[in-house]
Image (spheres, rainbow, N blue to C red):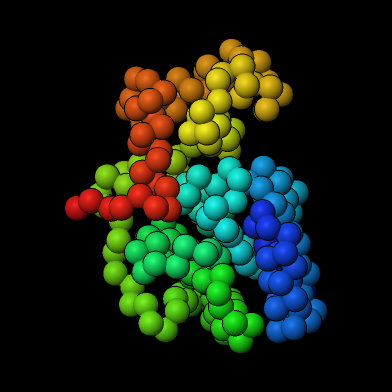
Amino acid sequence: MTQRFLIADDHPLFRSAMRGALSASFPTARIDEVGDIGSLQQAIDEDSDIDLLLLDLHMPGAQGFSALVHLEAQHPEIPIMVVSASETEEVMCRAIDYGASGFLPKSSSPEQISTAIAQVLQGERWLPENVRYQQASSSDEKSIAEVVASLTPQQFRVASYLVQGLLNKQIAWELNVTEATIKAHITEIFRKLSVHSRTQAVLMLSQLDVNTPTVE
C-alpha cells in the first residue's frame, strides 16, 4: 500500500527540500503539499488517509501550537510530526505535550529526516538525540489547549482571525459567511474560553504561541 505524506509549510523552497528528502527514502510514497492552514484543512477533508503530516508551527493560520492541538483533536488517527526552525528544547517538549508524534528541526540532515519519519511511522515518538522529553506546558496552557481542541473547524478559523486582529466584517468576508454567523461563532468561543471580550480571548489563545514562556 502506497504511503501518503502531507507537507504543511508556507515556504516553497523548504517544501521542495522536504519532498526531495522524502522521495529519496520513500520512493513510492505519495507526497502532497499545502502552504496554509485553510489549504491543509481542505486537503484533509478531501482525503484523510494520511500516513504522516509534517506541520510547520509558523505557517499562516497555525497560531503557534493551536493548529497542532486542533488537528490532533479532529483527526487523532493522523500522526503529526512538527517541523520547525524553533529548535529550543522547550518548544520541542511542548509539541509533544500537545499531541505531536515527533519534532524534526528544520536544520536536520536527510539522514535524520529519514530516521525520524521511519520511527514515527512505526508508532514511536521521535525527538533529536540530545533532547530528553520532560513536560513543558503549564496547567493553564493545557486548559486552553483543551478548549482549542473542542472548537469546531469553523470556530477554529474564526479564533485564528481574532488573534490576527480582524474585525467581524473582515472575518465574514474571509469565510464567505454573514457577519451574524461570525458573531454567533465568537459568542460560542467566548463561552468555551469563559471570557467576555476579544482582548481576553486573544490573550488566552496567545498562550499557545511558540515563543510564549511557560509559567508554573
- Residue at image x 31%, y 52%? 213
Q: Position of residue 78 (x, y in %)?
A: 59, 61
User: Residue 42: x, y in percent?
Assistant: 71, 45
Residue drawn at (52%, 23%) of the image:
185
Observer-nearest residue: 210 or 184? Answer: 210
Against 103, is 68 above or below? above
The quadrant the N terminus occupies is bottom right
Q: Is residue 170 visible?
A: yes
Q: Position of residue 47 (x, y in %)?
A: 74, 54
> Would residue 118 be visible to someone looking at this image?
no
Quadrant of the rendered structure where residue 96 is?
A: bottom left
Q: Residue at x 40, y 62 (%)?
A: 91
Q: Considering depth in this image, is 2 or 18 the residue closer to the camera?
A: 18
Q: Residue at x 44, y 28 (%)?
A: 189
The number of discs equals 0
Question: Position of 177 compared to 95: left or right?
Answer: right
Check the image and report above or below for 191 versus 9.
Answer: above
| Residue farthest along the top direction in this orientation | 180
Q: Quadrant of residue 152?
A: top right
State the image coordinates of residue 155 (x, y, percent, origin top left). 54, 32
